[in-house]
Amino acid sequence: MYLGIDIGTSGVKAVVMDEHDRPVAEATAPLAISRPQPLWAEQAPEGWWHAVEHTLDALATRATHAMAAVKAIGLSGQMLGVTLLDETDHPLRPALLWNDGRATAECRDLERCFPGFAARVGCRPMPGFSAPKLLWLARHEPLALERTRRVLLTKDYIRLRLTGEAASDRADSSAMLLMDTAAGEWDDALLAACGIDRSVMPRLVDSAEVAGSLRPEWAARWHLPSGTPVAGGGGDNMCAGVGVGAVRSGDAYIGLGTSGVYFLANDRFIPATSAGMHTHRHAVAGLYCQHAVVLSAGESLAWIGRLLRMPDLSSLIAEVEAATLMPAETPVFTPYLGGERTPHDDPTLTATFSGLTHETSPLALAQAVMEGVAMALADGQAALIESGANIGNVTLTGGGARSVLWGRLIAAATGISLRLPTDGHTGPALGAARLARQSVGGPLIASINGEEAVVPVEPSLREQLLQKHTLFRRHLRLSR
């Protein structure tokens, strides 16, 4: 057995996986985001830990025998967050998250100071990334940075609590924009430019390398073997790639979670110099990964659900699907509730509806949100292709992938048939468990997770969305 823990943005998920990649038990716990000012997005690191405790307590109760057989633990987590710890390893302030947009000026300054920034780290500085946020903290909260003795990513804070080790994998850390990505080591000049030095950064390990051992008190509490190895793991996007089997060059997935991620594995390091693209190290040895990201995907649907007083998204989606609306019957929605990364690289972009009439229904608004996310992902795909990427098989995953309609809309908007694993057991937690198995000498992937269904491109629906996409882009130009 192997345990994978994913600390996401909206919740924590833990999965116990057997030797044949079959989940035998899982548990979840929710997380909340704080937005104290416009463009800000923060979470308390203690909240992550309490959610991990909740999920593992649940597994210890419901799956005692499986937990006792766990051979290794893997960690996955939301990427780019900045957690500052003092000399006693207590958080100095809430963590700045991946969708925090406050550091726009710092991005410009970093790019001006380092003309070859993208070639060194894999992409241009963008507000959600760690380096500009650290520079923002150096300028606006210097006392907090002066007291900082550790800078950790989300999952690495959990590793510290589990094992006492301050370590991070090279895949997740490569997205901090503080590393020479090709070399896989911290870059002292970039660290200094952001007001920190190497001494506060964690030691670097590979994703499938043992990075510490579980503390005895936690092993006893959760019925895990004493000294259970904890692997390096990876960022949630990289671990999701492992979870869906995107482990060869050309493999891709679209993840529909809080954000929308178009992820492509590549055997070449192709730095992204425009269009809000970014390139990092994959959790799979020898591979890199290119990303196109829609910041508000599932978050956009949750937002419209709250406005419509239909917060149960499963019920909302079911009603939208039953309505069988055509794109011509719905307004145009641009899903930029908190700015956008790909392809606009603009944290100040705002979301808009256009084409509203007296006849526009609540369900038409909800479907328009789903269509808008699909068209934004198509724009991300275009940016990937323009960078020289060769896209092969594409798998649809994440919570939004459970919607048949959303899958059809994304296939039509992108023009690519999507693979949809029928058993649903994919994602970052499963990928983290697979990396845990590899860290103790097992295979990365032992079996394929069930047969795959295919979401085909429907010509009529594609034609309608292509026409609507023209309006989508026109309205975007007018609103900027």
Image (cartoon, rainbow, N blue to C red):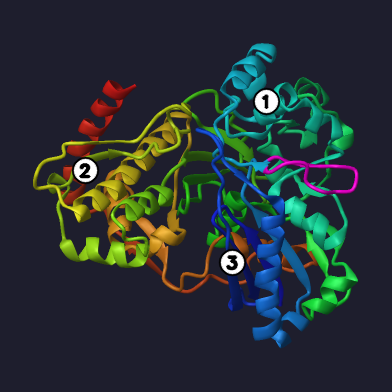
Marking on residue 465 = 2
User: Is residue 327 visible in the rendered structure shown here?
Assistant: yes
Residue at the (88%, 57%) spot, across then down: 164
**Between discs 2 and 1, the one toward the N terminus:** 1
- Expressed as whole percent of the image width and height from the top left, the position of residue 108 reads 59, 16
**Between discs 3 and 2, the one toward the N terminus:** 3
83 within the magenta span? yes
Given residues 138 and 331, the one toward you in this image is 138
Comparing labels 2 and 1, the label whose residue is closer to the camera: 1
The residue labelled by disc 1 is 136
**Between discs 3 and 1, the one toward the N terminus:** 3
Alpha-carbon span between mark 3 and mark 2: 36 Å
Q: Which residues are magenta?
A: 82-94
Question: Left or right: 172 with respect to 265?
Answer: right
**Within-10-Å neighbours for mark 1: few <14, some 14–19, many 20+:** many
Residue at the (54%, 23%) spot, across then down: 273
User: From what the image shows, is residue 377 above or below residue 190?
Assistant: below
The residue labelled by disc 3 is 29
Query: Tag 2: residue type?
Result: Leu
Given residues 143 and 100, the one toward you in this image is 143
- Expressed as whole percent of the image width and height from the top left, the position of residue 292 reads 48, 38
User: From what the image shows, is residue 246 above or below residue 450?
Assistant: above
Main secondary structure found in the magenta portion: loop
Alpha-carbon span between mark 3 and mark 1: 31 Å
Query: Tag 3: residue type?
Result: Ala
Q: Name the quadrant containing residue 136.
A: top right
The residue sitting at the bottom extreme is 65
Q: In terms of secondary structure, where does tag 3 sit? A: strand
Alpha-carbon span between mark 2 and mark 1: 40 Å
Marks 3/2 in contact by CB < 8 Å: the verdict is no
Residue at the (69%, 73%) spot, across then down: 56
